[in-house]
Amino acid sequence: MRWIYTFLLAVVVSSVSSAADLPDLQGREIFAVTENAYTPLNFVDPATGVGIGWEYDAMNEIARRLNLEVNWNLSSWDTMIQSVRSGQYDIGMDGITINDERKTQVDFSAAYMVSQQFMLVRADENRFSDASGFAAEANFLVGAQAGTTNFYVAVYNVLDGDEANPRIKLFDTFGVSVQALKTGDVDTVLMDAASARGYIGANPGAFKVIGSALGTEEFGFIFTPGSDLVAPINAALQTMRDDGTLDQLNQKWFFDYNQ
């Protein structure tokens, strides 16, 4: 199956024209946090047990350009935003959707990616072919991680708007929800196009995507409110967009990478 999807890389407003114009942060150590459960943005390499993915590569390249030292840390999704807000970590990343409610808690970088939400199902699924077909059958279940964009799309774009709907089966991590889909414990999982492409590539013959896009989201890094890292990191992102580095990361992780 040939996958067609669009990555729209956001334009970061900046006067920086090249990496040579970026500020030198003089080896400053920053504490970054992720979850290692959102293929292909951040996950554990099954061969080495090391965290890898699009966000790791992007952040490490930003650090190289700004002369930063990244101290990587792990956190569950349900505590990540609060831990960055409180200053426990300087920057967080986990395919975090930029929205107004979260902006009241943390600062965001400019969007580094725009993606759309789709329904991931098992490859042999033939009982429904879109969101309306899924919603019409009361026994079908959707797997989700509480508090995520995928959860809210399931609630408001697929089902009836009731966040306590028993048809939504909650899981602690995104990866566990996909495993539940694979084993038949749920019937669909909603995810952005990038991650769907990653899971399909990593599990040949196991999954497919059905229906049309159910929502659009922008991903950004999160920072402790008032952080002085926002401007230089936005500037570094702009140079990476300008020189094709972000396109290269998309190619590597969304097309070329195979587990």
Image (spheres, grey):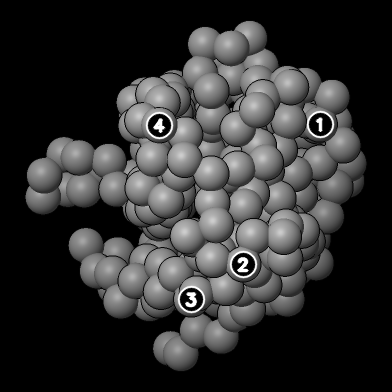
Give the mark, 1 or 4, whose residue is nearer the N terminus: 4
Residue position for label 3? 244
Looking at the picture, does residue 209 appear above or below residue 2? above
Give the mark, 4 or 3, whose residue is nearer the N terminus: 4
Residue position for label 4? 26
Residue position for label 2? 17
The reply, left or right, for residue 144 in relation to residue 63 is: right
**Toward which corner of the image does residue 117 lie, by quadrant?**
bottom right
Tag nearer the camera, 1 or 3: 3
Which of the labelled discs sits on residue 103, or is there none? 1
Cα distance in 3D space between marks 3 and 2: 13 Å
- Is residue 232 in view from this perspective? yes
Looking at the picture, does residue 234 appear above or below residue 226? below
- Is residue 74 in view from this perspective? no
Q: How crowded is mark 2: few (under 14 residues within 10 Å), some or many (20 or more)?
A: some
Q: Is mark 1 on a helix, strand or loop?
A: helix
Cα distance in 3D space between marks 4 and 3: 25 Å
Q: Could you say where residue 50 lies in the image, as x and y percent from the top left?
A: 20, 40
